[in-house]
Image: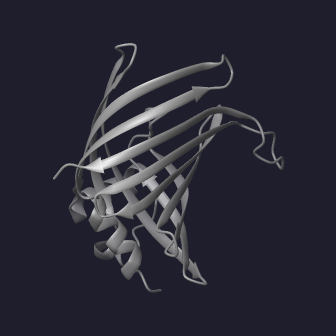
Amino acid sequence: MNLSDIHYFFECCIGHWSIERTYHYLTHQEVERSHTDFQVEAISPDLKRQVLADNAYAVPDNLDGLPGFNLVFHTVSDKGEKVSQELRALFVPKQQTHGIITGDYLRDRAYEEARPIVSSFRYDPSNRELLMTTPYTRVVSVDSIVLVNPKMRIRRILNYQHPEPGQPLDTLVLVGFGVEQKTD
């Protein structure tokens, strides 16, 4: 599996980001704007092992080569609401087909629910898009990050009402858009 492009993507993510987002809450027709300061640092092999253990996930042979991060962010909404969080994330590539890499995305603490969680990811090197799909209890979040260049990312967040088993994702409850600019 050739991981050079996905490693480039993740190397570009290291640093401090200033993020402006707009969220559209479709269940009650509300629009919210927010600003987030986001710090991304690489994590040690010990922290990678901890994320795996938190998720009861077997340690892969290539642990040192897996992209992993410590994320710290602070968000202030246009209503004055503040949210701060720190979490660790690890990406475990499983398959590569026509250049597209798929695998598991593990966190020691999820955004929507304060618990460890295993999600799936898809990375397309043709447009440098990382697509992460997380099945939470009430919603399924489909989060896209497109690396425009090493200092700019575009974010799209689609939260769907959790469908019945076997049914498609077709009821949006939240849509978010963001421009993320690296400041260091």
Rendering quarter of residue 24: top right
In the displayed structure, 57 sits above or below 77; it is below
User: Which quarter of the picture shows residue 14?
Assistant: bottom left
Residue 107 vertical placement versus 33 (above, below) = below
**Rendering coords of residue 109 (x, y %):** 40, 40
Its colouring scheme is: one colour
Could you say where residue 61 lies in the image, as x and y percent from the top left?
Answer: 38, 79
Residue positioned 34% across, 73% down in the render: 7
Seen in the image, is 52 located left or right of residue 158? left
Q: Which residue is at 27% across, 67% downward? A: 11
Residue for point 45% across, 67% down: 92
Q: Can residue 61 be spotted in the picture?
A: no
Specify whether 75 is left or right of 146: left
Q: Residue at x 32, y 61 (%)?
A: 68
Residue 47 as seen in the image, left or right of residue 6 = left
Q: Position of residue 123 (x, y in %)?
A: 51, 68
The residue furthest left is 184
* Depth order, front residue of 157/3: 157
Q: Is residue 81 visible?
A: yes
Which one is in front, 53 or 14?
14
Residue 60, image x, y percentages:
41, 73
How many numbered circles does the render carry? 0
Up the image or down, 14 lies above or below 96; here it is above
Q: Which of the 4 image quadrants contains residue 96?
A: bottom right
